[in-house]
Amino acid sequence: AATPLPNGDILVGDGSGYGVIELSHQDKIVWKLNHASTGGPHGHASTRVRNGSFEHTIPGSQTILAYWGRNDALAYNVPPGRRAIMVRDGHVHHKGHYSARITYHGDSNGLFFGQIVHVLAGHQYRFSGWIKTHNVSTCYPCIYGTQDPRGHTAEFELTYNSSSGTPPAAPALPQHTGTIGWTKDELEFTVPANVQSIGIQCELRGQGTVWF
């Protein structure tokens, strides 16, 4: 749910993930309440990606992924009390028996599965993941800063988290639009000195369907 504020910002409420967010004119988070800073519903961040093949769900569910947070607080067209379609999918997958799927048609500022992983400064890591899209296209407002184009992509996104000060920008992975078959995205990177963890996001920045 989203409510305009007198100053022109937007107040966004969500039961999990971010909690409550104030979003500025530039689509930046002004403040947040009850933001989950760990790697998902199963406790603190790990030193490795957990449930990276999306095979496992939380107890009592066949679709809600274990260890991955579902972040749909900025999906503006989801009715109050409902969630965006962010599920484990047994019909489309690259390896194993399942994939993670996001399907959304409407306005948003991004939907993603997220997880935090502890890393060691100065060490080299490799990230790799498979992605498939169907009719990923532009949505509105889907603007990520005044200089950025409107969101029209799906991608893996990495973010650095620092122990102090502002973290540097993490290396970028390819952004995909339209319809593509299973594609492997990977990169190697060395962790900067002040970084203690990395956020991994499987993200839909436009509208359509993406599998990871």
Image: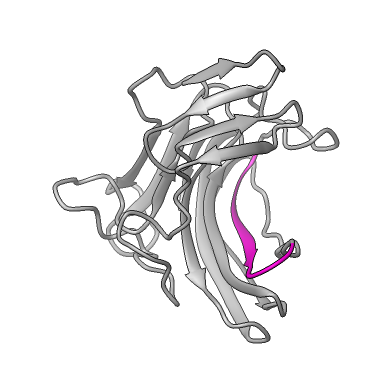
- Who is closer to the viewer here, 35 or 129? 35
The answer to whether 95 appears left or right of 6 in the picture is left
**Splitting the image into 4 quarters, where does residue 84 fall?**
top left
Residue 108 screen position, x and y as percent: 58, 28
Residue 169 screen position, x and y as percent: 74, 61
The image shows residue 180, relative to residue 98, as above or below, that is above
The image shows residue 136, relative to residue 128, as above or below, that is above
Q: Which residues are magenta?
A: 153-165
Residue at 73% from the left image edge and 37% from the top image edge: 144
Residue 138 screen position, x and y as percent: 66, 28
Queried whether the magenta region covers residue 167, the answer comes back as no
The answer to whether 104 appears left or right of 24 in the picture is left
| Magenta residues, dominant SS class | strand
Residue lying at the far left in this picture: please name it: 60
Number of marks in the image? 0
Residue at 16% from the left image edge and 52% from the top image edge: 59
Note whether residue 95 is visible: yes
- Who is closer to the viewer here, 131 or 189? 189
Note whether residue 182 is visible: no
**Splitting the image into 4 quarters, where does residue 81 fall?**
top left
Residue 142 screen position, x and y as percent: 66, 29
